[in-house]
Image (spheres, rainbow, N blue to C red):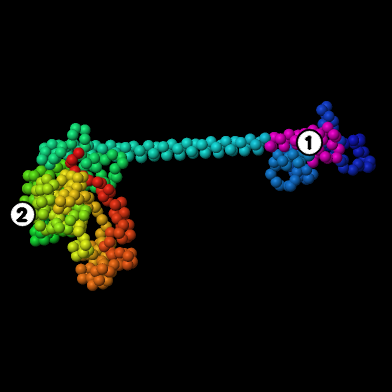
Amino acid sequence: MASLTKGNPTDTGQKKQADPKPNTRQETRRTGTLIATESVEEIRSAEMARIYLEKGLYLCPQGEPITPTSLKYCLHQISRMPGITVPIGKAVRAAALLIEEFEENAVAETIRDTVNTQLSSLTEDFQLLATNVKEQIDGRLEERLTDLDKYTTRMDKVISKMETNNASLPQNRTHPAPHGHRSYTETLISPPRHVDPRLAAKEGIRARQFMLEGITKDSKYGEMNNSQLKTELSKILRELGLQGKGIRAVSRQRLGGLLIEMESDNATAWLKEEDNAKEFCDKVGPDAKFKTRTYNLIAYNVPITLDPENEKHLAEIHEINQVEKGSITKARWVKPIARRSPSQRSAHLILTFTDVNTANRALTNGLLICHSKVKMDKVKKEPIRCLKCQRWNHYAKDCPAKEDTCSNCAGLHRSSQCPNPLKRRCVSCNTDEHASWSRECPTFLRKIDDCNSKHPENALPLIPSDEP
């Protein structure tokens, strides 16, 4: 709107009035609100409003973003402007307080929404994590159950084949197992939960092993390595008609024999048949034969009047204990006779049995030797002590030491040539309280504990067999 002016139009010669000033007279509306005509005409946008408020120092600081808080402070400033009536000032301050309450509610609502969103996201993440963990556990459990089912099925087949073989060879079972009872070997191969799984694995391997002797260095197989022996012997088995899997491994033993491990129970049962075993040995060589497994037992406190080299003494042991002739093939003293004290009247004896059931009955009942009842025990796996340097875990033939060390006095000479046989010194413990060969040596006792943990069969009271 154009500015309003007063007066008549100017005549010629009449003095012109000065430039009219804008009319700042306030108009009163029916509501009673005072509005400056000049402000209404000039402020047409939010930007113009901002400039106007900043110029009047109602909105500070200049250039900052507009927030509910800044508007609240601006309204409080406006309510204190000169010329503002009391009702208008109260109304403006009331609007400022409502804006403040609105801001607090908006902030609280924003925080609540943010927290709810974060909690929802966290809950979903935890649910997803729990689902994934449950799926992994279920998968692992299913795999273990599947493996257990396969193992149980395989062991059931082994037991079934063993029962079939034992039924066809009744002479190998002196005391057949009654119905519903299992043999010692069967129990170890398919063990209850409390049996050491390593023991079950060892017995399963041992059941598939054969010892082949008579392979001389001059023969075709004398210079072959283990891999070549496996290839050649497997070829012979296939020529003889063995179907499926054959030999798993062949290893040459320290005393010259070949330890053969079959790959399956079927192959083991096939090679156990007398005709097949004989044909196999004939193909390998004229001197080849399967060696029967032997079992060493120790007899405690045997009278030293026994002569282990005397065949009549061994025959007397067979006769007085009602043991089948040939069941005990060898006997030897544990400690050399030279180490005996002058007053010694008994010593420990090692007996070698060829029949496992006879050996187990001797372990259970003991033996009569030289009219004395002696207690028997298994010869257990023990740590290896070098007889050259008196150290552990290697044999004398593999010893790196240049000189011998005495097991009596720890001197640099052979034990058999010790000039002071009564002197005692332990190489391992570096003490004069005992000799290196003493079974009371603390180092030896620690080695025994380590060996027992590696060979759980040491804890078995009897030798695994087909007896119930």
In percent of width and height, residue 37 lies at 82, 35
When asked about the image quadrant of residue 21, the answer is top right
Kind of residue sitting beneath label 1: Arg
Kind of residue sitting beneath label 2: Pro
Q: Secondary structure at mark 1?
A: helix
Q: Secondary structure at mark 2?
A: loop
Residue identified by numbered label 1 = 93
Per the model, the C-alpha gap separating discs 1 and 2 is 122 Å
Which stretch is magenta?
77-104
> Does 90 lie within the magenta span?
yes
Q: Earlier in the sequence, mark 1 or mark 2?
A: 1
Which residue does the image show at 8% across and 44% down from the upper left?
274
The C terminus lies in quadrant: top left
When asked about the image quadrant of residue 103, the answer is top right
Farthest residue to the top: give it. 30
Residue identified by numbered label 2 = 286
In percent of width and height, residue 63 lies at 71, 47
Which residue does the image show at 91% across and 42% down from the upper left?
16
